[in-house]
Structures are given as structure tokens and as C-alpha cells.
């Protein structure tokens, strides 16, 4: 069952990149637009949420008015990290499959309407409405009328399940992981949420009979926040792939030893592993945002319209937002919602509030809102079925 889910990765990546590079969107032309006052919309972050929002807003130009979007990302390429659990296994994906250039997807838009800048956000002045950015060529200041924060998260242990600051850094980390997987005889995967289970399943499928694969779960079952049948089926699948599961066990400490790791577990056991893969803990990329707009964990506090609390012209979507689980479907749904409702927001008309998901691991997010508003996103019905099929089996 897990491998069946994994085999949808190729279709998922192909469809997702097709979507993210803009081929689903057709720009609506409006002869009145040129006469309207030009507004600057700055989007910080070039992953799923940021790219989706950019394309969605460009589609809504006739309703929103004359504007220019500036998309800022430290990455030249979009990283298909949904496939990273399989990507860490050597020879599964070429770099060209996992990393797709961002700029070509926006090539059809004129420079007067869209600009892509490879840079990182350094600071945000919400009073002056300015963002300081840095790149290989130096520092610069961007002024905005409207700002969308979509800078995402990174893994706490700098593992390549999320982007790591630049396309080059992420590729290097991924290649290093692949080399470690190839060499290792004993691999310990800590964390039995979605990522941990997927990683263990991929490793078990490829190496279950030649390497020792151990999955540690801090709870009495894997995927503890998913429906019981999902946990049950996933457990059976892992065992069939020769993955050992240790329940009610977490890593207390890890110490490097002879090219590997000595793990001290919560049950007092010391476990030696050639490779240790933690799959828990996300750190928001939010250091550039004034702390008063962040919660205690560094995520951006937003209201029911995804607007940053206390600000009028700034929104936060995707992983950096405190709104929902840090998964693809919520990120995409939030971006769709903002794109669809932006025109109403700019006319000071409150749209229908965003419907956040209460189910963490299924990650539907605001997909309920998306399905209710399928008139402008009906081209994603086939793609949606792929993700439903994939996530339903954990």
C-alpha cells in the first residue's frame, strides 16, 4: 500500500510542476486596466504557496486592477519536496525532476506586470511598507502596496525534506543524504508522522532485506492523528517491508561515533545506527518579520481572512502561517483563497472567511473552500484526485 502511494510521486510531481509553471493559467486581458493606478504586490517565497498565489493573482488582473507582482525567493528552482521521502533513496529521481526553474513559468507575463528576484528577505518595515532583501549582488529595498508572506519553513535538523536556503544548498544536502543511505547498514528514522512513515516505507521497499530499517514512534501507534484504518494499513505495510517499529520511544540524544550515531532512547536503550534521520520539527523562515506578529514558535499570526493580525495590507500563507498543518494541500488552498478573494479585499468587502482544516495529517486544509469555489480552479480536479489517493494511504 505504501509503495502504491509512492508510485504516484511521478504523476504528482509532473502535474504539480505543470501547475506551478503556469500552464493551467490563462491571463485575462482588460482594456481598462492600463488606466488604473499601478499597485505593487510583493510576494516573499517561491515555493508552493508563493508561486500559486502569484499565478492566481495574475489570472485575476481584470478584477484586481493594474498591478505588478514581484516574487522574491532565495531559490532559482522550485523543489518538489513532496517527493523527498523517495528522493533520498539513490537513483530514484534525477535532479531535473525534483528541481524545476521558477522563471520560465512566468515568461508569458510582461516585465511591467511580473518580476522574479533571487534574494532573501532580511527585514520588514510595516510602517514604511518596505522589505530589505539581500542577494549575491548586494542589498536592496522593495516598496510594496500589498505584501504576501510565503517564506515557508525548514527542518529543525537541516534535512532535505524542505528547502535549505538556496537551490544549491538543498541539492548538496540531498546528494549527501543519498550517499549516506547507500553506505548505511542500519538506518533509524525518528518520528512516525507522515514524513517518517513515508521515509521508512521507501527505505523498506528498497533495502528492507539488505539493511536494518527502524522506525521510532513516540506514541502507541504510527500516524497518531490520522484515522485508525490509515494507521493500521500503514503499520501492516511497513512490517511487510521488513521495517521494525519501536513504539512509545523517542530519541533523547544523539552522539557521533565511528562515522555513525549512538542514540540514547527514552526507554534507556542505546542504539547504534549508521544513519539517523529525524523527521520531526519545523522552523519557520520568519526571522525578518517583527516579533510582535509571530506566535511563540515563530509562525505568523493571521485572522480568518489570512491577513496578518494587526496589519491591513499584509497576508501570510503556507508553512510560515500559524493557520494550519505544514503540508501542500493547505498551502495551495490558502493561496487559491487569497487569489480568489483579493479583489473583494481591495474593495473593502469582506469575503467568506477561510475554512481551515482541523485534521492535521490528512492535510486537506482549506481544500473544502477550494472545492466549493471550483469554478475558477476546475482544471485541478484530476490533480486533486491524485493527492487524495496519495494521502489517503499515508
Image: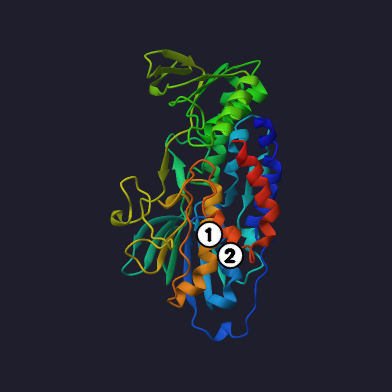
Q: Where residue 79 is drawn, which disc sits there? A: none
Q: Earlier in the sequence, mark 2 or mark 1?
A: 2
Label 2 crowding class (10 Å Cα cut-off): few <14, some 14-19, many 20+? many
- In this orientation, which residue lies closer to the viewer: 133 or 88? 88
Q: Which residue lies under the disc numbered 2?
A: 56
Tell me the residue at 55%/86% (across/down). Answer: 35
Quadrant of the image for the C terminus? top right
At mark 2, the secondary structure is: helix
Residue 91 showing in the rendered view: no
Tell me the residue at 43%/22% (across/down). Answer: 248
Question: On the picture, is 99 further left or further right than 299?
Answer: right
Q: Where residue 335 is drawn, which disc sits there? A: 1
**With respect to residue 213, does 321 lie above or below?**
below
**With respect to residue 107, does 222 lie above or below?**
above
Residue 130 showing in the rendered view: yes
**With respect to residue 235, does 349 lie above or below?**
below
Amino acid at each position: 500500500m505504501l509503495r502504491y502511494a509512492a508510485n504516484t510521486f511521478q504523476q504528482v510531481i509532473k502535474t504539480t510542476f505543470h501547475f506551478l509553471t503556469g500552464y493551467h493559467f490563462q491571463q485575462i486581458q482588460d482594456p481598462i486596466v492600463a488606466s488604473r493606478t499601478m499597485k505593487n504586490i510583493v510576494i516573499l517565497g517561491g515555493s508552493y504557496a508563493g508561486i500559486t498565489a502569484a499565478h492566481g493573482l495574475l489570472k485575476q488582473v481584470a478584477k484586481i486592477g493594474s498591478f505588478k507582482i514581484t516574487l522574491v525567493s532565495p531559490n532559482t528552482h522550485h523543489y518538489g519536496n513532496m517527493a523527498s521521502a523517495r528522493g533520498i533513496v539513490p537513483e530514484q529521481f534525477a535532479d531535473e525532476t525534483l528541481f524545476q526553474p521558477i522563471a520560465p513559468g512566468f515568461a508569458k507575463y510582461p516585465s511591467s506586470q511580473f518580476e522574479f528576484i533571487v534574494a532573501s528577505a532580511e527585514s520588514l518595515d510595516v510602517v514604511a511598507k518596505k522589505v530589505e532583501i539581500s542577494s549575491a549582488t548586494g542589498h536592496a529595498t522593495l516598496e510594496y502596496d500589498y505584501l504576501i508572506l510565503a517564506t515557508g519553513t525548514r527542518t529543525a535538523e537541516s534535512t532535505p525534506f524542505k528547502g535549505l536556503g538556496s537551490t544549491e544548498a538543498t541539492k548538496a544536502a540531498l546528494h549527501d543524504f543519498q550517499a549516506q543511505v547507500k553506505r548505511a547498514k542500519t538506518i533509524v528514522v525518528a518520528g512516525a508522522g507522515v514524513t517518517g512513515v513515508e521515509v521508512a516505507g521507501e527505505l523498506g521497499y528498497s533495502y528492507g532485506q539488505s539493511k536494518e530499517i527502524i522506525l521510532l514512534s513516540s506514541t502507541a501507534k504510527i500516524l497518531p492523528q490520522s484515522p485508525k484504518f490509515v494507521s493500521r494499513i500503514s503499520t501492516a505495510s511497513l512490517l511487510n517491508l521488513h521495517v521494525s517499529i519501536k513504539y512509545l520511544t523517542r530519541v533523547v540524544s544523539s552522539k557521533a561515533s565511528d562515522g555513525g550515531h549512538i542514540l540514547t532512547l527514552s526507554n534507556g536503550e542505546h542504539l547504534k545506527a549508521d544513519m539517523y534521520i529525524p523527521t520531526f520539527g519545523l522552523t519557520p523562515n520568519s526571522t525578518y518579520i517583527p516579533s510582535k506578529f509571530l506566535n511563540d514558535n515563530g509562525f505568523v499570526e493571521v485572522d480568518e481572512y489570512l491577513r496578518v493580525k494587526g496589519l491591513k495590507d499584509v497576508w501570510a500563507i503556507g508553512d510560515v502561517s500559524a493557520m494550519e498543518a505544514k503540508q501542500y494541500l493547505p498551502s495551495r488552498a490558502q493561496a487559491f483563497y487569497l487569489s480568489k478573494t483579493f479583489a473583494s479585499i481591495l474593495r473593502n468587502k469582506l469575503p467568506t472567511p477561510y475554512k481551515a482544516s482541523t485534521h492535521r495529517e490528512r492535510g486537506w486544509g482549506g481544500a473544502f473552500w477550494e472545492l466549493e469555489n471550483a469554478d475558477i480552479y476546475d482544471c485541478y480536479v484530476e490533480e486533486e484526485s491524485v493527492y487524495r489517493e496519495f494521502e489517503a494511504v499515508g
